[in-house]
Image: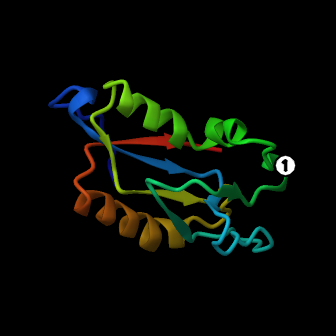
Amino acid sequence: MTLSFVRPKKPLSGMRLALVTTGGVHLTTDRRFDIDDPLGDCSYREIPANAENLTWTHAYYRPENAADLDAVFPLWTARRLVEEGVVGELSRRHFSFMGAIHDPEPLVRETAPEVTGMLADDGVDAVLLTPS
């Protein structure tokens, strides 16, 4: 697989943005990521754009407030940027993976292409990746 930079054809203020993180963020009602899997959990969690009740699996990240979580998964900041006209709109859904994947083959072969397809289906113009 070859990755390359593609110059945007329109300004950010006209783009649909999605967030993707490796911070293990998920809805409070979702199944946690499996941090005990020695190869790493290659699954993902879908996060609706209107989500409010988020947490994350990493024990050392447990936030006291949403501002801490926003540093890893900046959904609230992205919403504000849409309100201010800096970003055109947010995608209807965003995605989260777990970091520390020691065997990335299932991620490369299965889950990353699946998420990429959903982002394309959603008409996403740009993705903000927040690694953790």
The residue that appears at 37% across and 66% down in the rendered structure is 113
Up-down: is 132 above or below 47?
A: above
Residue at 25%, 43% (x, y): give it.
125
Mark 1: amino acid: Tyr
Q: Quadrant of residue 110?
A: bottom left
Question: Residue 43 appears at what percent x and percent y?
Answer: 56, 71
Mark 1 — residue? 60
Instruction: Residue at 58%, 69% (x, y): give it.
Output: 42
Residue 10 sits in quarter: top left
> Where is residue 53 drawn, in percent x and y?
63, 57
Report the quarter where the N terminus lies: bottom left
In the image, 90 versus 114, the foreground residue is: 90
Residue found at x 70% / y 56%: 55
| Camera sees residue 2 | yes
Q: How many marks?
A: 1
Q: Which is nearer the eye, 132 or 79?
A: 79
Question: In the image, is residue 22 above or below residue 11?
Answer: below
Picture colour scheme:
rainbow
Q: Is residue 98 visible?
A: no
Q: Quadrant of residue 28?
A: bottom right
Does residue 31 appear left or right of residue 44 in this picture? right
